């Protein structure tokens, strides 16, 4: 049976499709409910976390950060830094294979780095320091810099969206503004494309030829040992229904159980709830700077007075054990956290907001506010924003849609009355928003910036300064300057922090604590 299973998998991959074996051949299947249904499959084209999670199932990374945030080799066997810190040499591990059986090469990695760097905030900044990326041989390549920067190792080990996943050269050469159609990876699981049914399930099967590192797993680093033959992501959007299925043993894992149902879940003797500071996230409001009314920074500034964090946190999470009001742009309890400039802000001072709108000449242009309806952690954000904005004098047109529709629509630059948008709200995990370079919504590089497309030379200069600086004290000062400029320009507004636990059956063992839910090392015991 084992030989037959491998033969079926090899035949599917040779045909160019990462197809699955039949369920009857799988020895161990873990059934999971993720925070969202999977409808988009390119983790470079979008920052959506469900697509990032999909990426970690089937792709691998050159470097990774362990549980302490230390950069470790992953696909590379070793890397060397030149004495002048102006070049890096990377050597791939032996035995790395794509799911179609072809070896992973330096050319694959170079093409993947370049595609990722066009879309990612940190990658874009990293490439401004890069002079060349070139292959030495099939397993070795170099990155040469114009001047020293710490962004190379930080970028290639970036743990969350966008993650620099490695893809075959033929795939990585796809225009980064277009979605890939070939999902051949080299990670521990293979995407069973023929079983993928959006709205029902997504299936992954173990890649028998994956060669894990010898170290134990730590964060997103270490050995990615696939102990499961098959993983099924089941699409259950109703939070109560998902937890009922977990209690009955119909599913094994829930990525984001609703906070208001945790009390009942904790009483279930067959269920474990896992919470960790690594699972902390920050809510943010993202305005679109291209179109009225938020093309005017004075109008955007009124939002700092219209909002307060407590309303958003209580409406979404509601449990004080899992929330933390925090005005720091770069996450409380981390090295760059500061509340400088924030004292009078985020206090729901509607009168002050009204004054600013009047002074800015707001003419009543409606704000098209996109409202995600199917992610419990996000569902109540837009209604709270609408209420607070209307009290401040904004006219708000809240349009409801599922998260994947919102993800597709936010990439459009069209005017709001032609299918575009003015604002939406989302959440970023701690790993994504700890410094000015990796925080996507601080990127103000105009057309190269993330959806919302802020354009501010002052912010970009500060981000450059941060990228060049190695002294932690000076980095802290630059981060404070970035926060003050963010308040003036308003590319985003932080709306508080929360911890999102995961829930699983007690017979599920080996869950790795990391900023991203991963399924290697997990197993189901009897």
Image (cartoon, helix red, strand yellow):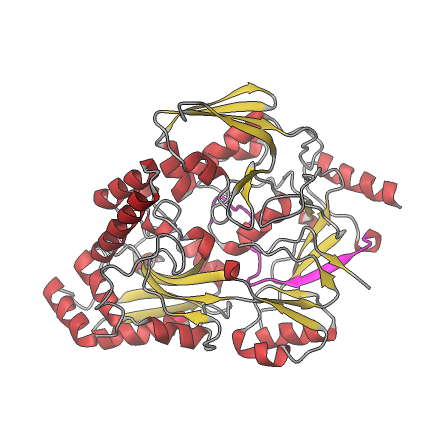
Task: State whether residue 5 is above or below residue 292.
Answer: above
Task: Classify residue 434 as left or right of residue 38.
Answer: left
Residue 467, percent across and down? 34, 38
The furthest residue to the top: 136
- Residue 35: image quadrant is bottom right
Task: Classify residue 279 as left or right of residue 384.
Answer: right
Question: Where are the magenta residues, as a range?
Answer: 26-46
Task: State whether residue 2 is above or below residue 171.
Answer: below
Q: Residue placed at 25% from the left, 40% from the top?
A: 461
Residue 264, percent across and down? 61, 81
Residue 103, percent across and down? 67, 28
Which residue is more in the foreground, 89 or 371? Answer: 89
Task: State whether residue 430 is above or below residue 354.
Answer: above
Task: State whether residue 171 is above or below residue 512.
Answer: above
The furthest residue to the right: 1
Total labels: the figure holds: 0
Does the magenta run of residues contain 214?
A: no
The furthest residue to the left: 359
Q: Residue placed at 83% from the left, 44% from the top?
A: 5
Residue 173, can we see it?
no
Residue 392, percent across and down? 22, 74
Task: Classify residue 79 as left or right of residue 497.
Answer: right
Residue 336, can we see it?
yes
Does the magenta run of residues contain 42?
A: yes
Which residue is more in the foreground, 434 or 260? Answer: 434
Q: Residue placed at 71% from the left, 32% from the top?
A: 101
Task: Classify residue 298 as left or right of residue 231.
Answer: left
Which residue is more in the foreground, 252 or 91? Answer: 91
On-image quarter of the C terminus: bottom right
Q: Residue placed at 66% from the left, 34% from the top?
A: 98
Q: Main secondary structure of the magenta part?
A: loop
């Amino acid at each position: 049976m084992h030989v037959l299973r491998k033969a079926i998998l090899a035949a599917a991959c040779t045909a160019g499709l990462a197809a699955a074996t039949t369920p009857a051949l799988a020895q161990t299947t873990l059934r999971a409910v993720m925070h969202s249904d999977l409808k988009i499959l390119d983790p470079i084209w979008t920052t959506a976390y469900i697509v990032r999670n999909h990426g970690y199932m089937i792709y691998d990374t050159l470097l990774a950060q362990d549980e302490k945030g230390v950069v470790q080799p992953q696909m590379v066997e070793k890397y060397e830094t030149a004495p002048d810190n102006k070049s890096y040499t990377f050597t791939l591990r032996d035995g790395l294979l794509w799911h179609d059986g072809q070896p992973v090469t330096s050319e694959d990695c170079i093409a993947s780095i370049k595609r990722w760097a066009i879309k990612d905030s940190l990658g874009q900044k990293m490439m401004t320091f890069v002079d060349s990326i070139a292959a030495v041989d099939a397993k070795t390549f170099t990155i040469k810099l114009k001047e020293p920067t710490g962004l190379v190792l930080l970028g290639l080990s970036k743990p969350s969206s966008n993650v620099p996943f490695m893809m075959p050269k033929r795939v990585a050469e796809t225009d980064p503004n277009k979605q890939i159609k070939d999902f051949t990876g080299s990670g521990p699981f293979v995407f069973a494309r023929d079983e993928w049914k959006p709205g029902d399930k997504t299936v992954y099967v173990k890649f028998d030829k994956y060669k894990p590192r010898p170290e134990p797993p730590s964060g997103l680093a270490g050995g990615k040992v696939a102990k499961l033959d098959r993983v099924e992501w089941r699409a259950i959007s109703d939070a109560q229904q998902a937890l009922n299925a977990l209690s009955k043993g119909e599913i094994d894992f829930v990525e984001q159980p609703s906070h208001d149902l945790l009390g009942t879940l904790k009483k279930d003797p067959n269920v474990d709830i896992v919470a960790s500071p690594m699972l902390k996230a920050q809510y943010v409001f993202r305005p679109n700077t291209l179109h009225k009314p938020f093309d005017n920074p004075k109008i955007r500034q009124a939002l700092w007075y219209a909002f307060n964090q407590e309303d958003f946190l209580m409406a979404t999470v509601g449990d004080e054990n899992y929330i933390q009001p925090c005005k720091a742009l770069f996450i409380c309890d981390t090295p760059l956290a500061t509340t400088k400039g924030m004292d009078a802000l985020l206090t729901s001072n509607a009168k002050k907001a009204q004054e600013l709108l009047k002074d800015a000449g707001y003419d009543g242009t409606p704000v098209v506010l996109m409202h995600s309806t199917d992610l419990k952690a996000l569902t109540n954000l837009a209604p709270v924003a609408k209420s607070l904005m209307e009290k401040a004098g904004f006219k708000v047109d809240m349009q409801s849609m599922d998260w994947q529709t919102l993800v597709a629509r936010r990439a459009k630059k069209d005017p709001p009355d032609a299918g575009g948008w003015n604002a939406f709200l989302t959440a970023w995990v701690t790993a994504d928003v700890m410094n000015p370079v990796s925080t996507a919504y601080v990127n103000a590089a105009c057309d190269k910036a993330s959806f919302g497309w802020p354009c501010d030379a002052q912010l970009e200069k500060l981000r450059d300064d941060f990228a060049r600086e190695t002294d932690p004290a000076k980095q802290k000062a630059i981060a404070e300057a970035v926060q003050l400029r963010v308040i003036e320009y308003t590319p985003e507004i932080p709306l508080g922090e929360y911890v999102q636990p995961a829930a699983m059956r007690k017979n599920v063992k080996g869950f790795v604590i990391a900023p991203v839910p991963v399924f290697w090392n997990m197993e189901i015991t009897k």
